[in-house]
Amino acid sequence: MSKNLFITGTGTDVGKTYVTGLVIKKLRDSGENAAYYKAAMSGNERRPDGSLIPGDALSVKEVSGIAQPLEEMCPYIYENAYSPHLAARIEGEQVELSVVEEGFRKVSGAYGYVTVEGSGGILCPIRYDGEKILLEDVIKTLNLSCLLVADAGLGTINSVALTAEYMRARNIPIVGMIFNRFHPGNVMEEDNIRMCEELTGLKTLACVREGDRELRMDAEALKSLYR
């Protein structure tokens, strides 16, 4: 079975998918058989034949260079760019945790390292009809530790601290933080990172600059985060 890690963000559009691609690329470049998985994916375009393209999975595949088939990467793919619970309600295919877990077990049985990406922020509802499934339910069902991705810019202190507090209140382990869109020498961003560390007690594992094609982190240190 694989070693696994969950990547969540402080919200939508913080660059979680891009960072996930760099993380998996680092694993692949170090010689590991690395794979990607996501429970539910919204906002996807259609192929000419009408089938949906799992956009986040395709992006990760292109950034990381892994050979894993797209079909293995996500059991629930939606066209509408909404929270998965709403997209699922509109499109008539609700998420079942048993299906998510089954797909994950198949991937984890075939690869050495599996990186699971969340949808939006930690409070993202995956299903909310007669049954309620939040992102934290996926994390706990798959028994995963979490890496937190945040934007380095204005507002990140609040979003990082609140996300960390929410996760700790629900006994979700956090292994550290990666800050995206970081500009070296930017006084505000450097202070943001310092304050996030002070307020949460979490360690910054890497900072990603726009256009980076490599994760500035030791491969062995990265592997040690997976369990």
Image: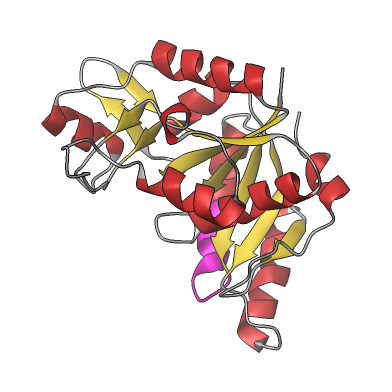
Residue in the image at 71% along x and 88% along y: 185
Q: Name the residue: 24% across, 21% down.
A: 94
Residue 191 point in image, percent of width and height = 68, 78
145 sits left or right of 47 in the view: right
Q: Quadrant of the N terminus?
A: top right
Please check the rendered image and state whether residue 189 is part of the magenta-colored stretch, yes or no.
no
Q: Where is residue 87 in the image (x, y as percent from the top left)?
A: 20, 37
In-image side of 5 versus 160 (left or right) = right
Residue at the location (62% across, 74% down)? 209
User: Horizontally, is 50 left or right of 136 in the view?
Assistant: left
What is the x, y in percent for residue 104?
53, 21
Q: Which residue is drawn at 42% across and 11% down?
A: 98
Question: In x, y percent, where is residue 15?
Answer: 49, 60
Report which quarter residue 152 is drawn in. bottom right
Dominant secondary-structure state across the stretch colored magenta: helix
Q: Is residue 68 above or below residue 58?
A: above
Looking at the image, how many numbered discs can be counted on the residues? 0
Q: Which of 168 and 57 is in front in this view?
A: 57
Q: Is residue 148 depicted above or below 146 in this figure?
A: below
The residue range painted magenta reads 152-162
Nearer to me, 3 or 161: 3
| Residue 9 in view here | no
In the displayed structure, 171 sits above or below 26; it is above
Can residue 91 be seen in the rendering of this structure? yes
Q: Quadrant of the C terminus?
A: top right
Task: Choose between 160 and 94: the one closer to the eye.
Answer: 94
Examine the structure image and report whether residue 154 is included in the region drawn in magenta: yes
The coloring applied to the image is secondary structure
Q: In which quarter of the image is residue 46?
A: top left
